Amino acid sequence: MNDTKNKMNSLPSINISKFFSGSSKDKNKVAQQVAKACREVGFLLISGHGISESQQEALQKKTFDFFDLPLKEKQKWGPIGFAKQRGYQRIETRNLASTIGEIAPPDLRETIFIGPIDDHRRYYAETPGAQNAYAQNIIPTEPEGTKEAFTEAYRIFEKLSSSIMRIMALALDLPEAYFCPLISKHFSVLGIHHYPVLTEPPKKNQLRAGAHTDFGAITILSIPGSESGLEVKMDNNSWLKVSPKDGELVVNLGDMMQRWTNDEWRSTHHRVTVPKTSDPQSRRLSIAYFVHPNFDAKIECLGKNLKPYDKPKYEVITAGEHIRQKMEASLHK
């Protein structure tokens, strides 16, 4: 059991700006801080990331404007065919708790999912299953300016994710550019989540997002306000409330990174709780960028994380197959 994790009363907070503007010593210091957080809890708060508060606030406004539309209007941008991570998903269509084998009602949130802006479908035309990972986007065009705002948001988080993966590589004692060729044709997803005010009591054990781990390599999360409802599970089964300061982003590891590091780093269970009140202030928004490497990238143990006499704990799997398996488990039937 990790006693350090049990004693935490807040997540590690790291200013990453000097990784990009400082000396080699500064880079290594940031990487070491990140490595420590990844080993101990798998979650951290970052500042100095280059995304301004005004950018985040502008995106939040556009997002609320879209979710304020009538359900019939929002459903015009629903998923088509087998591409389940595109377009608008109404409330109670996902069940994240099911991905870890728990039985619970579906989640109380609605979402817009946006996939890669760059089109890699031709490159993966002959790869089974890749058509879903690289499916055409369904981005709302109403209210005016929504598509442009959502597309810009994807690009902003895409750029930041590339930088964070460089930090992760150095934190693993790998070359800084190690992950670059593995994310050159990524199928990362931007999930814009809205947690509406509840009009009726939730069902027993129903949450805004059930306890789960994230599927990909890392997740970058913007959750405005200190009462986000996001909680991280500690080793003693208690739940730590996540309360970023203004401008801070949350970064957490996903299952792929845990597999890559042979469990040296953690993909930690987390959830979004239901507020105790149903007043208008209980409405919440989160914007999450889920980093999914290239569809055919191999998720296999990075040798440097094998201690003497250790063996890889997981079979080699491609990023595409890993996400497919997780997605099947999360969809509410």
Image: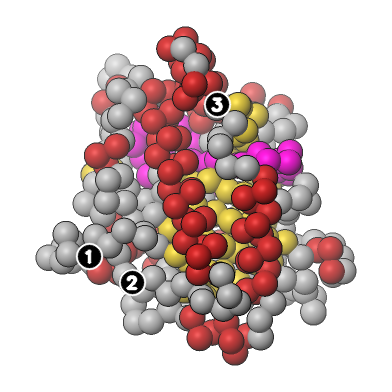
Residue name at image x 75 percent, y 32 percent: 9
Task: First in sequence, mark 2 or 3: give its number.
Answer: 3
Residue name at image x 42 percent, y 68 percent: 85
Q: Is residue 151 visible?
A: yes
- Rendered image: mark on residue 172: none
Circle 3 — which element? helix
Judge from the rendering whether residue 127 lies leftward or rightward of residue 274; answer left or right.
Answer: left
Quadrant showing the N terminus = top right
C-alpha span from label 1 to label 3: 35 Å
Circle 1 — which element? loop
Q: Which residues are magenta?
A: 240-269
Residue 80 position, x and y percent, is: 38, 82
Task: First in sequence, mark 1 or 3: give its number.
Answer: 3
Residue 160 position, x and y percent, is: 47, 41
Residue denoted by label 2: 136
| Marks 1, 3: nearer the viewer | 3
* 312 is higher (above) or lower (below) than 203: above
Residue 41 position, x and y percent, is: 57, 33
Residue denoted by label 3: 17
In the rendered image, which quarter is residue 52 located in? top right
Q: Are marks 1 and 3 in contact (CB under 8 Å)?
A: no
Amino acid type for the residue under numbered disc 2: Gln
Q: Give the residue furthest to the front.
A: 144
- Rendered image: mark on residue 121: 1
Judge from the rendering whether residue 278 lies leftward or rightward of residue 153; answer left or right.
Answer: right
Q: Are marks 1 and 2 in contact (CB under 8 Å)?
A: yes
Residue name at image x 63 percent, y 74 percent: 66
Residue name at image x 24 percent, y 39 percent: 181
